[in-house]
Amino acid sequence: MIQVENLVKQYGDHYAVDHLSFTVEKGQILGFLGPNGAGKSTTMNIITGYISATEGTVTIDGHNILDEPEEAKKNIGYLPEIPPLYVDMTVKEYLLFVADLKRVPKAEKNRSVAEAMELTKITSYQNRLIKHLSKGYRQRTGIAGAMIGNPEIIILDEPTVGLDPNQIIEVRDLIKNLSKNHTVILSSHIMQEISAVCDMVMIINQGKLIARDTPKNLARHLSGTNSLDVSVKADEETVRNILASIAEIVSVETEPDEEEGLLYVHIYAQEDTDVREKVFYAFAGANVPIYGMNLREMSLEDVFIKLTTSMDGAEAKNLKDPEESGNEPEKEEA
């Protein structure tokens, strides 16, 4: 659906985008992450045709954004971080105006506007002036505008900035619904948002791609191990003797809780290994009661911080493009 090859945007000696290449498959929700100044907005502006690239190509559904801009842009709906709304228009007037800008055929215009309002749940606000809407409903109006003409691709730049928690949840649900019929690129600084709605994550830093995978796979690869927390009623020596029989366990740390009379055990196992079943049966076979068991993973926030602050080039290369090694990334449930 989207293919970006060797994309460069240079301002003097500064590379805002530095030889960036990636693809986005049809029906995918791609989370686009990076620190401020990493090149996210510049990349999205190039993809949408707002600005030109210094080098490289962007192909949208087989159409080069530079050589066939009109055909390529027909496939894109874009919501910038600050929605370009005309606040003295009503919601419906604005969406009809957008439909005219997108050259939606007259016979389809009212239907396209009605469908966009229905999907974003703003139909009851269609006759209200945009300046009288809350920020959440202005965002919904902006998303509805991006949907006019039923483009294959929806690109959303920080769609929940400034919204309250309830509004954020509503917009997340809306994005999930969009993915049923659209390919979605979502840029956000809110890690919980990316984890909640995206089945693929791409992280860039200083204009370069440093990682692309599912949130789950990124966490597993970066930690290098699977971590399991277990609370048991036993002494440390007994626990270590029991766990010594499980070859997949890399290391064990213990922490006594004298008040509860339990021992908290932190188990680190080899990557791609789930030792929960073996741990359970090992303790059960030794008549040691388990009071709790929890599989611990790095959060996406932990992944982001590690990748953008302390990762060296060799580590980043291993995470950059899972398809190149023949390993298809596991798809997360949205």
Image (spheres, rainbow, N blue to C red):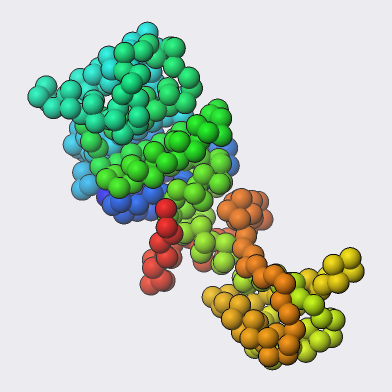
Look at 78% across and 83% down and name the residue there: 239
Residue 153 spot, x, y in % from top left: 30, 41
Image position of 172 with respect to 325: above or below: above
Tag count in the figure? 0
Residue 88 spot, x, y in % from top left: 37, 8
Residue 58 spot, x, y in % from top left: 31, 44
* Residue 57 visible in this rendered orientation of the protein: no
Look at 68% across and 86% down and name the residue there: 284
113 left or right of 32 in image: left
Residue 147 spot, x, y in % from top left: 29, 32
Image position of 297 with respect to 247: above or below: above
In the image shown, does 82 or 115 lie closer to the viewer? 115
* Residue 218 visible in this rendered orientation of the protein: yes
Q: Residue furthest right?
A: 258
Image-quadrant location for residue 267: bottom right
Image position of 244 with respect to 65: above or below: below
318 left or right of 50 in image: right
Q: Residue furthest left?
A: 107
In the image shown, does 126 or 151 lie closer to the viewer? 126
Look at 47% across and 59% down and name the residue there: 214
Look at 42% across and 65% down and name the residue there: 330
In the image shown, does 57 or 240 lie closer to the viewer? 240
Image position of 214 with respect to 139: above or below: below
In the image shown, does 81 or 246 lie closer to the viewer? 246
